[in-house]
Amino acid sequence: MVQNHILQLMCMVAMEAPVSFDANEIRNKKVDVLNAIRPIRKEDVHEYAVRGQYGAGWMKGKEMTGYREEKGVNPQSPTETYAAVKFFIDNWRWQGVPFYVRTGKLMHQKSTHITIQFKDAPTFAFPAEAAESWRSNRLTISIQPEMDIRIRFQAKRPGQTMSLDPVNMTFTYDNSDDHTPKRTRPCCSM
């Protein structure tokens, strides 16, 4: 279930900068990432991965059969149609940072996102009451259904009190023919 293209995207995000755009150089940098993925011991798989199958139900007003009821599928099939895995890349840049990969078949919405959640700073510069709704900063690269890059960070709420809220700033492409990047203003939604 963890398809090749999903691992390719993870490698593109995690790889060190190549010295050139030569295909062999880029491949070597991606292989370095794959070699640095922390092995998951068989007895620890349940701590890092979740697998499942889709069952019967409704999607977009249409009744759907479960995977084991599909034509040509063994009714006892253990084949997963959903997987979520937490990877760790053991190198100096990404040590201790989890990479979450999720993929599934026959999901409600087809989407591809890469989300990097930043570690919190070791000390907090604001009073505790300022950060009641504190969330870790996050960078999300959306590939489909829409292409955008979104960063979530903390901003002071307007007014006299010291209150922080998570806000998003989004860079997106519109559907115009010239594919000119469009910037959007930060908003207070998550």
Image (tube, grey):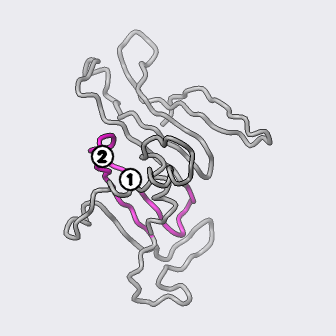
Give the residue pinned by disc 2: 91
Q: What amino acid is found at the position of numbered circle 1 in the picture? A: Asp
Report how far apart the C-alphas of labels 2 and 1 lie in the structure: 9 Å
Q: Splitting the image into 4 quarters, where does residue 178 fall?
A: top right
Q: Residue furthest left?
A: 43
Compared to residue 81, the image places residue 127 above or below, namely above
Where is residue 133? Give x, y as percent: 35, 30
The answer to whether the residue labelled 2 contacts the one labelled 1, judged by CB atoms less than 8 Å apart, is yes
Q: What amino acid is found at the position of numbered circle 2 in the picture? A: Asn
* Label whose residue precedes the other's in the sequence (2 or 1): 1
Mark 2, secondary structure of its residue: loop
Q: Quadrant of the N terminus?
A: bottom left
Q: Residue furthest top?
A: 160
Where is residue 7? Give x, y as percent: 45, 58
103 in the magenta segment? yes
Which is nearer the eye, 100 or 185?
A: 100
Question: At 31% from the left edge and 28% from the top edge, which residue is drawn?
Answer: 132
Q: Residue furthest right?
A: 177
Where is residue 123? Give x, y as percent: 23, 24
- Residue range (magenta): 82-111
Where is residue 122? Give x, y as percent: 23, 28
Of tags 2 and 1, the one toward the viewer is 1
Give the residue pinned by disc 1: 32
